[in-house]
Image (cartoon, rainbow, N blue to C red):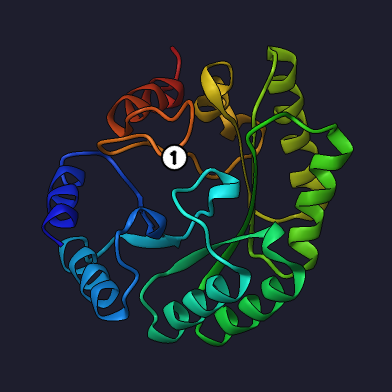
């Protein structure tokens, strides 16, 4: 809890609109501890939306978890209303996704469905199909992160973002990871991505830059010319 408090104090000096709490970084997932952790976050950031995420090792996270354990953790988080939104991995299984969407709707909590490919950038139709499926399963926001092997892969991801946003009429978050993909974190909104992630003390994904530097670049992009 002391480490979380220090992280929150650091965050207080950084620009941010949403706080993502990465549960897979916690040493303990004991419920009493989690209650105290989220209470601490809420007390220090009363007006800021909180996104709760458990990222599995298969999708770039810090630890493994079975589908049953994963669902149980999120159901408890939803019942306790500890967060304003949850991030659910598409490949955790469609039935798990459906049940969590239903539970989240009961609690009036937003659902983000996500998929992370740390090996490649799939073909355009495959990327679109994953995002379509998230929407079909009931996600309010859909998210896809992929690893480029060339700048052409980055451009393909940006193109898919623009096309799928118009098709599914839903908020979309996309990013190309790593050094080559960093540009997608800065200009993603130009093709329809609605959210980008910046790091506080330590990056949680390849190519993620610090929140303060990210804000500087976004302010330059948003500055009217002339």
Q: Quadrant of the C terminus?
A: top left
What's the residue at 37%, 62% (across, down)? 50
* Residue 176: % across, % down: 61, 29
The residue under label 1 is: 197
Q: For residue 88, what is the image quadrant?
A: bottom right
* Residue 125: % across, % down: 88, 39
What's the residue at 39%, 70% (across, down)? 83
- When the figure is inspected, residue 154 is found, relative to residue 115, above or below; the finding is above
Q: How many marks?
A: 1
- When the figure is inspected, residue 191 is found, relative to residue 101, above or below; the finding is above
What's the residue at 39%, 20% (across, down)? 220
Relative to 197, 131 lies left or right? right
Relative to 217, 133 lies left or right? right
Q: Quadrant of the N terminus?
A: bottom left
* Residue 146: % across, % down: 66, 34
Relative to 116, 216 lies left or right? left
Residue closer to the observer: 100 or 226: 100
What's the residue at 60%, 48% (across, down)? 58
Q: For residue 26, what is the image quadrant?
A: bottom left
Relative to 13, 48 lies left or right? right
Residue closer to the observer: 85 or 32: 32
Disc 1 crowd rating (10 Å Cα; few below 14, some 14-19, many 20+) is many
Secondary element type, mark 1: loop
* Residue 87: % across, % down: 54, 60
Q: Residue furthest right?
A: 125
């Amino acid at each position: 809890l002391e480490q979380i408090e220090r992280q929150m104090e650091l965050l207080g000096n950084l620009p941010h609109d949403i706080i993502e709490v990465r549960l897979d970084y916690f040493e303990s997932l004991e419920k009493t501890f989690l209650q105290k952790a989220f209470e601490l976050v809420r007390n220090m950031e009363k007006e800021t939306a909180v996104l709760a995420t458990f990222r599995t090792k298969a999708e770039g996270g810090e630890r493994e978890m079975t589908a049953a354990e994963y669902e149980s953790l999120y159901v408890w988080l939803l019942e306790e209303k500890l967060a304003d939104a949850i991030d659910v991995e598409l490949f955790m299984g469609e039935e798990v996704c459906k049940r969590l969407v239903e539970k989240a709707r009961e609690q009036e909590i937003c659902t983000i469905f996500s998929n992370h490919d740390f090996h490649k950038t799939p073909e355009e139709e495959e990327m679109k199909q994953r995002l379509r499926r998230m929407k079909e399963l009931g996600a309010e926001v859909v998210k896809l992160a992929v690893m480029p092997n060339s700048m052409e892969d980055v451009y393909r991801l940006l193109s898919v973002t623009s096309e799928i946003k118009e098709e599914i009429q839903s908020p979309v978050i996309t990013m190309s990871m790593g050094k080559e993909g960093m540009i997608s974190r800065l200009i993603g909104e130009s093709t329809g991505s609605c959210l980008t992630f910046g790091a506080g003390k330590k990056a949680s994904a390849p190519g993620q830059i610090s929140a303060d530097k990210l804000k500087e670049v976004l302010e330059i992009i948003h500055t009217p010319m002339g």
